[in-house]
Image (spheres, coloured by chain):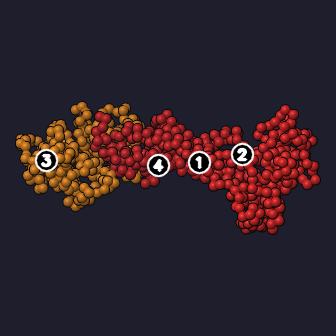
Amino acid sequence: MAKTANNTVIELNDLKKRFGIGDAEHYALDGIDLKVEKGEFIAIMGPSGCGKTTLLNIIGLLDRATDGDYLLDGKSVERLPGFRHARIRARQIGYVFQDFNLIERMNVIENVALPLTYTGTPHTKRLQLASQILKTFHLSEREYYMPWQLSGGQTQRVAIARALVNKPSIILADEPTGNLDSKSSHIIMEELADVHRAGNTIIMVTHNPNLTTYATRVITMLDGRIDTDTKDTKVDKKDAKGKRPLGQKPKVAKKSRKRKAKK
Amino acid sequence: MSLLIVEHFHTASVSLRRNRLRTLLTILGVAIGVASITAILALSSGITKIFNHQVSGVSGSLLIVRPAQKESSLVDLSNPTPSDAYSTSPIAERDLQTIRDIKGVKSVAPLMTLGSEIRSGNIAPKDATVLATTPDFPATTSLPILNGQFIDSVTLENTAVIGEQLSVDLFGTDESAGKIFTIRGQAFTVIGILQPQSNPINYNNVDLDRAAIISLDSGKLLNGGVAQIQQINVVAKKGTNMKALQKTVRTALARNHSGDADTDVLVGKEIERPTSKLFILIGGAMTAIATISLLVGGIGIMNIMLVGVAERTREIGLRKAVGASNGAIVLQFMIEALIMSILAGILGYAGGYLVAFGISLLLPYDPVFTWQIGAIAAALSIGVGVIFGIYPALRAARKNVIESLRRYH
């Protein structure tokens, strides 16, 4: 889906996000520089409160950065009006949540078809596309189940199907396996890996180090900054700690835990 | 966009159907408001229609002379007939002749009302009126005779034409020709009975159903020889310029009254105004009260929409996350509010007419159907939906996605 020649899907330059004002001021993101290439599967790790989710929310245009540049497909999106953000969310971004967030009163196929509503797809076409995508997740026979009739793993597969139904250029997953047992977790991760193999860009936030085996690149965050990155990107020399070839199982080095002086 | 509206329509009807009772009660609130406004408008335009009908009966060639009224205040309006009807009037008998002599005048009829008791044996109907006039009176107002004849130049004094209701009240029948009753002890013979009029409110200010019509001479005798004329009905010849005639009559009367402008000369719409103004005012006041009930209904919509928005915080957050713009969310909830208010409008319009027809059984006139009332009902219901739906919808749209999704874990 990436339209730019250099295959860079996301580019963040000195991205900052401040919460609170005055004495309560706190930078959840404190200068993030990041380049994401098309087809990468990035796992973002880090302790609670280090800004992983905030970063994901900003990338997903659910939140706005306080400062810095965000280029999506080579275009700056940070200062676009809200409805343009909504359009990008509808067409270019698929979101997978920790707690699934299916709409309880809609059945599986309607839930999956929901994002297509906002891209102006006609009703029948929506259901066809949703049905197709559910088939790839082996959920065809569950199309008319209600969300509460599904197991956790099935629910999350439905949620991933929903994230993929509008063929987004990036898939953002915020602890997609956080509410699942380990078996279901691995099923979900296999599905995500399949999605990745199909050529999609995935950014996943996780607490579980085991899951980073599926990723092509692992970023650890600390105090609103990128602490380690398994891929040495040019814009991020300062924070890049490891250089590993793409696709190889990375060992997450968390040796330098020393706090960086703020500002 | 149109696709989205269809989609929202579907979503809204699903969510409204999920809370059937809640939706129904909310709709009922607005429907009651719309119904009361519809009923009041239907009934009050029923009155206006009666006036229009009467005036059009003499095809716009009617001119009326009345004693001058002070600029009518609310107090005057609330008792238009009794205080004026029996008071001394500046209109003298010679004014009749003056008007009769004006070019273009076809017929002239004086109206002299007397507050005298009408009696037959022991029966004395309280609300009966004595009206003394000339044989020209039927020419100035629609007055079909049921039985017998109207007083004319050759009928004897002490004969009377009575209204159908008065006849029934006095004699227990409308076949009362030849029967005798008394006015101030003076015996009168019934020579004619009027057809039921069933419009007690008319420009003659007399309920002809309950009136005994006697000749002007008899009336003068009963009044100590003085004609006490409350009103003169004048019908002009066809093709007369009514405005010009009004001016002529006014000047002629002023000359008669030594320059005093103590009479009102009314033509066209002015005729119905003094009396119908009262009803327009009452109608307006009632409409204002009914609007309050509509307002309460609207608040009901807002309340239920706010509850709906709170309940669906997560859904709103998710919809926004998967690409719904704020506009789309506003639209979704506005459509929901509008569905409720429009259904309420339809229900209220139908219910309002049911109520209006129910009430009209107790009233001498019927409610009317006009496109204006339908338009008002439609505008009100849509207006209520928009006004009370917009705030909850905006609230829904302004919700922060992240907070909405984090809520209710």
Tell me which numbered mark, 2 or 4, is placed earlier along the sequence. Answer: 2
* Cα–Cα span, label 2 and label 3: 92 Å
Residue at position x 75%, y 47% from top?
B86
* Numbered circle sitting on residue A225: 3
Quarter the N terminus of chain B occupies: bottom left
Please name the residue that numbered disc 4 is placed on: B386
The type of residue carrying mark 2 is Pro
* Cα–Cα span, label 4 and label 1: 24 Å
Task: In this rendered view, identify the residue nearer to me: B131 or B142.
Answer: B131
The type of residue carrying mark 1 is Gly
Task: In this rendered view, identify the residue nearer to me: A191 or B347.
Answer: B347
Does the residue at mark 2 contact the one at mark 4 (Cβ under 8 Å)?
A: no
* Chain shown in orange: A
The type of residue carrying mark 3 is Arg
Viewer-side label of 3, 1? 1
Does the residue at mark 4 contact the one at mark 3 (Cβ under 8 Å)?
A: no
Please name the residue that numbered disc 2 is placed on: B82
Number of numbered tags placed on the structure image: 4
Quarter the C terminus of chain B occupies: top left
Tell me: residue A169, above or below residue B33. below
Q: Position of residue B268 (x, y in %)?
A: 71, 60
Task: In this rendered view, identify the residue nearer to me: A42 or A143.
Answer: A42
**Dots 4 and 3 on the same chain:** no
* Chain shown in red: B
Element at badge 2? helix
Q: Position of residue A173 (x, y in %)?
A: 25, 43
Element at badge 3? strand
**Dots 4 and 1 on the same chain:** yes
Tell me which numbered mark, 2 or 1, is placed earlier along the sequence. Answer: 2
